[in-house]
Every structure is written in C-alpha cells, then in structure tokens.
Amino acid sequence: MSIYGTVEEADKYHAARGRADWAGLSEEQKHQTLISGAVYVDGEYVARINGQLSSYEQERAWPRVGATTCDGVAIPDDVTPQGWREASFEAAYLESKTPGILAPNEDRSVVLTEKTIGPMTKKFKAVSDGSSSGKYFGAIEQAVARFLQPETTATADDSAHYGGSAFWV
C-alpha cells in the first residue's frame, strides 16, 4: 500500500518536532504506521475535498485534478499538498504511540437527531459527540484545514438532489 511522502520526509518532520521515539521505530514499523496514517486521513477527510482522482486505479485521495484550497486557490494536478502529507505523518505518529487509535470506533453511540426549521424537519444519524469518527485529532485537522471545502447546509430546495423524502420529512 502507498503512503504520502516518504519515510525520510516523515523522519525529518518528526525530528523537527523533537519526537525521538519516532526515530526509535524500525523502517518497517514507520512504513506500517504511515500506511495507517494515510488511510485514516483519506477516509476521514476525502468527502470534504474537491477535484477528482488523477486516475481510476489511484490508491490514495491525492493527487487530484481540479482541486482547490478552501479559498479557491488551484492546487496543481500532480501535487499532493504538504499539509495532507503532514496530516498523515501526524496520524502515523499517533498510531505508533497507541496502536489501533486510528481504527474506527465501532462502539461509539450513534443517535437519531432532528432539526426543525419552520415547517421542515430534517432527520439524520450523528455520533453522540457530533464528530464524524468519534475522535478529534487537532494537529491532523489543522494540517488539512485549508484543503477542506466549507460545509454546506441543506435547504428545502436541496431535497430533490438528495432523493426527496429520503432526507426530508
């Protein structure tokens, strides 16, 4: 499986942050945690980036064609943003410190939530703490923040795009 960046780039990244424990990992351990980090970052954030994969057989979310930053600056089609690589390095470090921390939290509480605005009520499932995975890693979120597209709020006019009554009650 592929990773973002290289083990050497991750070594420099963690050394610059004084993480001597990263240096103590074997090359195989580093590569394994970098895979986990890349899989986590892609899975957690891919739905919030724009553009399209460069090829059908592409394993990772980057590089992308037609992607922009959150403020509309074009990202070259052949580039994986430095922040995305750094987010995967952060995730890999967390995984190296606490194996399994990036795995989906299967026992989190999912609740049915309703929001009523005027005559419309929207029902949706949500993790009880409001996050998508039940976990929040600030350093990872900060590294990818400028590549995430603003979240939009659905309106009654959007119901046709989402299957009508499937989302609107």
Image (spheres, grey):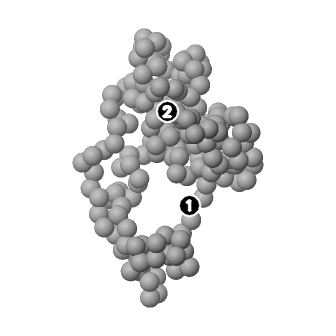
Mark 1, Cα crowd under 10 Å, few <14 / some 14-19 / many 20+, is: few
Could you tell me if residue 65 is visible in this image? Answer: yes
Position of residue 129 in the picture relative to residue 5 (left or right): left
Mark sitting earlier along the chain (2/1): 2
Q: Amino acid at mark 2?
A: Ala
Which residue appears at 52% of the width and 80% of the height?
A: 156
What's the CA distance linking mark 2 and mark 1?
A: 22 Å
User: Considering only vertical position in the picture, is 74 above or below 112?
Assistant: above
The picture places residue 51, in percent across and down from the top left corner, at 65, 49
Outermost residue toward the front? 56
Task: Give, as a three-letter code, the residue at label 1.
Answer: Glu
Tell me the quarter of the image containing the C terminus: bottom left
**Structural crowding at the residue carrying mark 2, measured as other residues with C-alpha within 10 Å and reported as few (<14), some (14–19) or many (≥20):** many
Q: Quadrant of residue 26?
A: top left
Label 2: state its secondary structure. Answer: helix
Residue at numbered disc 1: 151
- Tell me what residue is drawn at x 74 percent, y 39 percent: 76
From the viewer's perspective, is residue 49 above or below residue 76? below
Q: Secondary structure at mark 1?
A: loop
Q: Nearer the viewer, mark 2 or mark 1?
A: 2
Tell me: residue 66, above or below residue 97.
Answer: below
Image location of residue 129, percent across then percent down = 35, 56
Residue marked by disc 2: 38
Which residue is found at the position 43% from the left and 30% from the top? Answer: 36
Residues under numbered marks 2 and 1 in contact, where contact means CB atoms less than 8 Å apart:
no
Q: Position of residue 72 (x, y in %)?
A: 73, 53
Residue farthest left in this picture? 107
Query: In the rendering, at what x and y percent does residue 58 appear?
Result: 56, 35
Is residue 155 at all visible to an observer of this figure? no
